[in-house]
Structure formats: structure tokens, C-alpha cells
Image: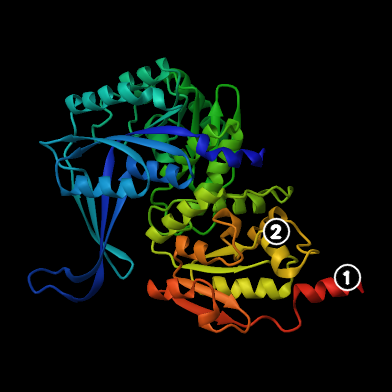
Amino acid sequence: MDLGLFKNLSNAKILVVGDVMLDRYWHGDSGRISPEAPVPIVKVSKFEDKAGGAANVAKNIARLDGKVGLLGLIGEDESGQILENILAEERIDSQLVSVCELPTISKMRVISRHQQVVRLDLEEMFTEQHSQLLLNRLQLVVDDYDFVLFSDYNKGSLSLIQQMITLAKNAGKTVLIDPKSADLNLYRGADYITPNLNEFKLAGGKTGSEQSLTDSARALIKDAGVAAMLLTRSEQGMSLISADEKHDFSAQQLEVSDVTGAGDTVIATLAVMLGAGMQPKDAVEIANLAAGIAVSKLGAATVSPEELSRKLGQYLQKTGEHYQTPFDDVLKHIEFAKQNGETIVFTNGCFDILHAGHVRYLAQAKARGDRLVVGLNNDESITRLKGPERPINPLDERAMVLSALASVDWVIPFGAVEENDTPAKLIELISPDILVKGGDYTVEQIAGAEHVLRHGGKVEVLEFLNGCSTSKVISKIKA
């Protein structure tokens, strides 16, 4: 597997077409029963709105740094406007078509004490006339993308999916489909379909034995004129099946927290990895790892390139290759983490020769929040601060060692922003929730502290491990 292709994730140009939805969550405590009916009273204290359906697929692609567009149908209502605002924040090029007579598909979930109390669905089936609007828009934009991904939730947006597939294939695009219909003939011409086990059985797939599963899958894709099937099989992992090949992948997460949106993560990851230039087998292997990460989280979760890279390193345990996120993408990932409500911690240093004191210090810093960003002095800065014989290790090597630590989420050189010996400008750009510094500093002496405090953040000073320092390590080596 060529891990270098991780640097090409932004090369993937993918258009998602399908049933878009607004997922709404109302959270609150329930301590009593209504006097009007035997139902709990939930005192709502928190509201959440998220992209759902095909929009969640597009969100997964964006979080993996793919270039993504989205076509779907919404109503001329508040829910449609909220969804468009969410997509804009996710940097998704959404071209949603408004229809005045029907509402935006919305699903409202009332949550109390980590349990769903009730779900309220607001939806009406879109017609072929509405689907024609999407087909017309697809014709206008299809040339801007290399892959077209259809996300079918059986809400009517893809009533004309056969015509859409034909249009995409005639334009030379790779077509992927997350199917909902039991009639796979609707997806004739697709390159990949990704049914789950239940959808597979409804379509006529047999699961009595591994051989019957393989034979029936091949018969289904042959009859439907589909090139390959990626069958997701829950705790049995997934299988990539074509006319002459079958590859099985074991499930990567034994303890599942929530399978919501796992299928969206799988097909989104598959599309991005194919777009980055991976072979199909390798792309599915990465998608399988992504699914393992997604189901370990609550809700319709997304996966970042850093999480995938770290998981892949553990999975392979054979290579020293490591994915280093480009600086512009790091800033985007930090912003996504903030949108998820995660606490961002920042610290900085030279980290020339990594030792036990550094490892302990970074673990303590990470424990202050959810994500740790490490600002790293560039080589010229270290030379100015430490003298002409430093650094011992160049910037790229120091960054690789740091980013391999479980406690570190992102590493950013100071020089990526400007040539400066302090991270003050970088801190202003990131605006972390917590700024951590090790040593004998006072808060007033810490670069960037004023900005963090002014924006409602915290500044903490941690002690270094006694007896550990890069200078002492160097002296010992020289001695």
C-alpha cells in the first residue's frame, strides 16, 4: 500500500447526488411524567443541527480533504436554510435545488439521559418532476468532477437515477452508489455499489455460506450490470466482490458505540481514496479502517486523515511511512474540531531530541482538552535561540517523531506562518481554548497568552520532568 497517496487526498473531486436531510437533536433531562399522558417531560437545554443523508456523505468527504460538491432537493423553508448554512461552514460546494411545495427532509430526535425518547420525521416523497430538476443540474456540473456518488435514501430525489448514471458514465466519470432499492437493476452501469447485509438479502443475496454469498453477489452484479460490490457485513467486516475477484476485510472495531452513519463513512472514504489514486483493494482497506473509527464514536461521526493515518500505522506495523498533514489542511481540521465542540490545546517548543520529559509533558498537555496542537520552532529559529550547532535533528524529522505520539494531533512549524522565534502569530491564527507552556514562566511571559485570555481561553504552566533536558542528553552523548 502506497501511503504517499495520502498526500493526494485533495485531488479527489467528488460530486454527491442524493437525498439530503437536516438532522436535529434536542437534548434535555427528563425527571417526571406528563400529567396529560404517560410520557416523559423533557426539559430541553441544548439544540444541535447536523447535515444528514447525502449531506452527511459530503461532509465525510470534506473532512477527509476531498473536493466535494453536493446536489439535492430542499424546501423553501427554515430547515433548508439551516442546512445550507451548515454546508457552507463545512466548505462543501452545495447546489441544492429548492422546491416550494415540499418541505426539507428533517428528522428531529429528542434525547434524554443518552437515550432517544422520540424521533419526529418531516418529509414528503419527491416526484420524478423534482428529480428532473436534479438531472438538469447534474448535466451542468458533471464535467467539474471525476467521481459521481449517488446516496439513495429512497426519498424520491433519485427517481431518475438510471438517467443520471448514464449521464455520468457518458461523461467518463466513476460512479459509486449507496443503494436503497432492492432492485439493483436501477443502478445499471455503476462501478461500485455498497449495500449492507440487510439490503443485500432484500436484493436476493444469499448468506447461508461464504460460497453462496460470493456466488449470489456475483450473480446480482452481473444481472444488474454493475462492475463491483462492496458488501458491508457489520461484525464480519466487509467484502469487495467483482466477477473474478473477492477480497475480505475483518472488522476493525470490536466494541461498537454507534453504527449511525457508518455506511456514509465507508462510501465517502472509498471515493476519496480512489480519487487519491489508490487501487480498489487498498481503497477498501482504508474504508474498512475508517468504518472502525466511525463506529467507535457516538452519532453520525466523521474521520480525519490523521486518525486514519494513525490507525493505518497500527494496522500495518511494517512501515516507517507517516502522513504529515499540509499546513492549510491542519487549520481546516482544527476548525472542524471546534465545530464539533472539541477543546483545542496548544503548546510549543523546539523538541530537538525527544526524551521522557517531553513525552510526559505532551501527555499532560493533551489531558487538558480533546485535541493537542504543537507549534514547532523551525530550524533557523532554533539556531538563533540555541546556537550554531543546533538543531541536531531537522524540522521534518522532528515533526515526524512528534506527530507519531498518541498525545499529539497536529504539528505546525512557526515558519509556516512567518519567520518568528515565538508562536504568537500562530496562536492568534488558531485561537486555542487552552494554552500550555512548560517551565518557570509566569502567564505574562508566555507568548500568545494575552490573545487566549482575551478570547475567553485559559493559560496553564506545567512543570518539566526533573533531570530531563535536550542539553543534558547532548552533553551525555558528547561525554
Instruction: Name the element at disc 1.
Output: helix
- Judge left or right: residue 446 versus residue 335: right
Numbered disc in front, either 2 or 1: 2
Amino acid at the residue labelled 2 = Asp
Q: Position of residue 310 (x, y in %)?
A: 61, 54
The one of 63 and 188 positioned closer to us in this rendering:
63
- Looking at the picture, how far across and down is residue 463, in whole percent? 63, 83
Dot 2 corresponds to which residue? 379
Is 106 drawn above or below residue 138 in the view shown? below
Q: Is residue 190 above or below residue 452?
A: above
Callout 1 amino acid: Ile
**Residue 141, located in which quarter of the rendered image?**
top left
Of helix, strand and loop, which one carries label 2? helix
Q: Earlier in the sequence, mark 2 or mark 1?
A: 2
Is 300 on the left or on the right of 228, as rendered? left
Tell me the quarter of the picture where residue 250 sits: top right
341 or 347, which is in the foreground? 347
Which scheme is used to colour this image of the protein?
rainbow
Residue 54 percent across, percent down from the top left: 33, 40
Q: Which residue is mark 1?
A: 477
Residue sitting at 55 percent across and 70 percent down? 366
Give above or below for 190 relative to 110: above
